[in-house]
Amino acid sequence: MVVVLLAGLITQGFAQGNGGVRVGVRAGYSVTGWQGETVKSFGDLLEYTNGNVKTKMRQGFHAGAYLSIPVANGIEFEPGVQYSQKGMVLEGRVPGDVGSITNAKVTLTNKAEYIDVPLVARVYVGEGFNLFAGPQVSFLVSNKVNVDAGAFGFSAYNSDFDWENGQRKVDVGLTAGAGYQFQNGFNVGGSYDMGLTTIDDNQSYKSYNHGFKASVGYRF
């Protein structure tokens, strides 16, 4: 699916090259998390740790392709498609009378993989400098939870589990940011993504994706 979408963008970009449409590629670093009732989504961990749980952002990467379509002087419409790692991290400590390991540290990492389809308007406000914003539709292609438990710096248990039942397969959100387009084709940018639909399809808890992206790209 990813290959087909990327090939479609690139083919269309080159086919319309004479009309000012240009194709580009982009990749970079991401930090993502959940907003809302994050801890409630893992109720068992909350129970075992007596509520002593903290959340962290998950580090990952993203990569994909896009089209730059001029619509007016200094304004471009930019549809794209990219593979994006998302998720979050929960950490807690299990009291000695509950866990088999005294004061065991338990880390749950949600490792979600999405195909993001941003549809943004990019406005140039100076030579190369630009601002962009628009809707983004994200398709969940894989969702796992890694459980790591241990104590004193040693891991006693580490395993991945599929976690797709009840998870929303399509996330609708917004993306916005700023970038700089160099004359040699390279560009850099940063953005903030915010999901508008709950991750849980049954809405038993209200958590939403959000995250930051820093990227480097090249426009042909």
Image (spheres, rainbow, N blue to C red):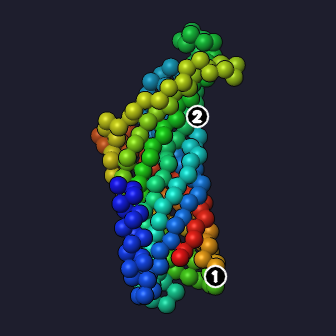
Q: Residue at x 41, y 40 (%)?
A: 143
Q: Nearer the viewer, residue 50 or 181?
A: 181
**Image quarter hosting the N terminus:** bottom left
Horizontally, is 64 left or right of 189 in the view?
left
Tell me the distance, in whole angstroms, between the alpha carbons under discs 2 and 1: 45 Å
Q: Secondary structure at mark 1?
A: loop
From the top left corner, tell me how far across and down residue 23 is, in percent: 47, 74
- Picture layout, residue 149 above or below residue 187: above
Q: Residue at x 33, y 45 (%)?
A: 168
- Picture layout, residue 21 above or below residue 80: below
Horizontally, is 175 left or right of 5 in the view?
right
Q: Quadrant of residue 20?
A: bottom left
User: Circle 1 sits on which residue?
Assistant: 183
* Label 2 Cα neighbours within 10 Å, binned few <14 / some 14-19 / many ≥20: some
Q: Residue at x 39, y 82 (%)?
A: 16
Q: Quadrant of residue 190?
A: bottom right
Horizontally, is 57 left or right of 14 in the view?
right
From the top left corner, tell me how far across and down residue 39 is, in percent: 48, 35
User: Circle 2 sits on which residue?
Assistant: 54
* Label 1 Cα neighbours within 10 Å, binned few <14 / some 14-19 / many ≥20: few
